[in-house]
Amino acid sequence: MADDDDYYEQYSNSSSDGEDVDLVSEDDGIAMESEDAAGVSNNVRESQEIESRTMTVKDLTVEMRDTINDVANIVGISPGMCRILLHKFQWQKESLLERYYEATNADAFLRQAQVLPKVAIEKPISNIGDCDVCCDTTQLCGLACNHLACDTCWKSYLETKITDGNTSEIQCIASNCRLLIEDEKVLHYVTDPKIRAVYEKLQINSYVETNRLLKWCPTADCGRAIKVQQSEARPVLCESCRQRFCFGCSYEWHEPVNCRLLKLWMKKCQDDSETSNWINANTKECPKCNATIEKDGGCNHMTCRNQACRTEFCWMCLGAWEPHGNSWYNCNRFDDSNAKNARSAQEQSRAALQRYLHFYNRYMGHQQSLRLEAKLYATVKTKMEQMQQQSMSWIEVQFLRKAVDVLSECRRTLMYTYAFAYYLKKDNQSMIFEDNQKDLEMATEQLSEFLERDLENENLVTLKQKVQDKYRYVDHRRQILLKYCREGQEKEEWEFNA
Amino acid sequence: MDSCSRRLMKELQQLSTEPPTGIICSRDIASDDLKQWRVEVVGAPGTLYEGERFTLQFRFSPQYPFSSPEVMFVGQNIPAHPHVYSNGHICLSILADDWTPALSVQSVCLSIISMLSSAKEKKHPIDDAIYVRTCNKNPNKTRWWFHDDTV
Ligand SMILES: [Zn+2]
Ligand SMILES: [Zn+2]
Ligand SMILES: [Zn+2]
Ligand SMILES: [Zn+2]
Ligand SMILES: [Zn+2]
Ligand SMILES: [Zn+2]
């Protein structure tokens, strides 16, 4: 395996000149999607999104065949061999051809690519002999390397590799040969249409997975691949199922945290599931009367259900809600002065856990709110219908849905800011980041609270203006935060503890 | 006779008539239907396992030799080795992804002896405790993430 990897590294040229896509100017809140897409918050165009093409399996097959034929015509070897060659070069046709022309010895080049045998043993005079695999005495055949087996064994071998081995790059039956078998040979032995269909699927899968410019859409059963002009960790949108995901790691778009840290973070959250169990994500106790409170909406401003208590508090920090609207209050910032004072190892590990839980709680909190936002879409839909009955047009009432879209995007961004912040080294810059995070969090909670609590009481004339003012402000805060993170990244100023 | 049995028969015959150094072939190594074998291997001279005897269990599916055999250490003496779990499971690429029908019981035994020989320290893999607690009884059901072969 190691040889293969070196091979890629050696020959792949990764060019990236980070061309920026124009920031999309926000329109007046008129979402262009049809109404039935309500509940999917992919209507807010992501400014970082890269140009891409959504491809079906049929598109992919055509593209793959075209590339193979181009190379076959130039190099003058079979299409099956070309597919192997292109696979080795991660489907970068230009760099393959470049290397091919540079190679002083074309055969040596093809040998290294496992398309020609390293050593061919001598072909026996008689084609009748003992098959080493099934021990039958019969007619034997082989590849260019002359490693022989009977027809039945070649067939069984290839079929097992395809159905159990799940690969379309199959090596010679001899154990140290490594010669890859070209498609034409494979299809000569494999005649069962079902297994041929599996083989075709594996070819396409291999095409997408080794191609730097292609990624499968992560939605289960979508079956589309997204093609980009250059591979970057930026968001792409599947035109078919409207899923937006990161081209770098195929996970949902996760700015500001980068792919590497996100992966670490998710692993940490998984590994620590035992500690997080006791956090109990959905129910908490009222900090004053200890009544059990269940969260039923995305807003973090909680009011205790106990009629005698009615304490208002913050779901995230369980602190009183009242100061949360003030700029001096830090719900988002972890105070690590306690950690510094911790002396014993036990205290230190407790402080580390406390720190982790601070970020984990907020990360999960926003994730949970994001899920509960689905309920808000339903509330808002009712309100929109109501307004249409009072003679507002369909277009005029879209601002409400846009508000929930923006709210969801902000929740998502906030969620990932906590994964980002967990690894961030504390310095002046991280303080500015935390201020931005706090501002966005405050604005988000205000919008959330307004949509959840005040929608009913607002008069229709002032409602539109108020909602629009709020979501524009929130979105503005989000852009500021992301821009700050991006700039830091471009200047490589962020320092992480991982 | 089907090709699987024919092949196993031939392997058994070869192995018992001329067993290579390090492989001990007692008379009753194979079950009557040939689908389960127990082969003894001996640690090579000059290595950490010099002279130690270990028992390898082989199980063959009807798809053998196209599918790899299920191979593991059994008995009292499981070698402490960076690629051998304390339940006898072995992390070796030729038993999974790199299996080909051209390999045999004999070549698997020799590979395992050479794997033992290259050890610099007698200890189980670091993830032994977790693996043994969570793995399937059949080592072939494990998606092996091969340890560095040079260890
Ligand atoms: Zn045969
Ligand atoms: Zn060969
Ligand atoms: Zn899709
Ligand atoms: Zn990513
Ligand atoms: Zn209460
Ligand atoms: Zn709070």
Image: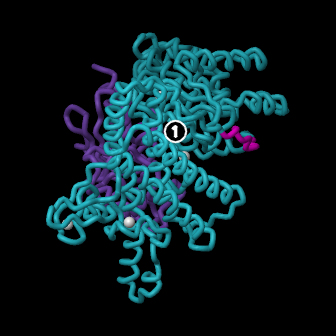
Q: Which residue is mark 1?
A: A245
The residue sitting at 37% across, 60% down in the picture is B127
Q: Quick one: quadrant of the N terminus of chain A?
A: top right
How many marks overall? Answer: 1
Q: Quick one: quadrant of the C terminus of chain A?
A: bottom right
In the rendered structure, the answer to whether residue A413 lies left or right of residue B7 reads right
Q: Position of residue A404 (x, y in %)?
A: 43, 41
Q: Label 1: state its secondary structure.
A: strand
Q: Nearer the viewer, residue A482 or A363?
A: A482
Q: Tell me if the residue at label 1 has its CB under 8 Å from ligand 4.
A: no
In the rendered structure, the answer to whether residue A300 lies left or right of residue A190 reads left
Q: Position of residue A235 (x, y in %)?
A: 57, 40
In the rendered structure, the answer to whether residue A280 lies left or right of residue A3 reads left
Q: Position of residue A274 (x, y in %)?
A: 28, 62
Q: Is residue A26 visible?
A: yes
- What main secondary structure does the magenta stretch of the protein show? loop
Question: Chain B appears what colour?
Answer: purple
Q: Position of residue B141 (x, y in %)?
A: 32, 41
Chain letter of mark 1 equals: A
Amino acid at the residue labelled 1: Phe
Q: Nearer the viewer, residue A117 or A37?
A: A37
The residue sitting at 66% across, 29% down in the picture is A91
Q: Is residue A252 visible?
A: no
The stretch of residues the image draws in magenta is A15-23
Q: Is residue B45 magenta?
A: no
Instruction: Residue A493: name its quadrant.
Output: bottom right
Q: Residues within 10 Å of mark 1 (few under 14, many from 20)?
A: many
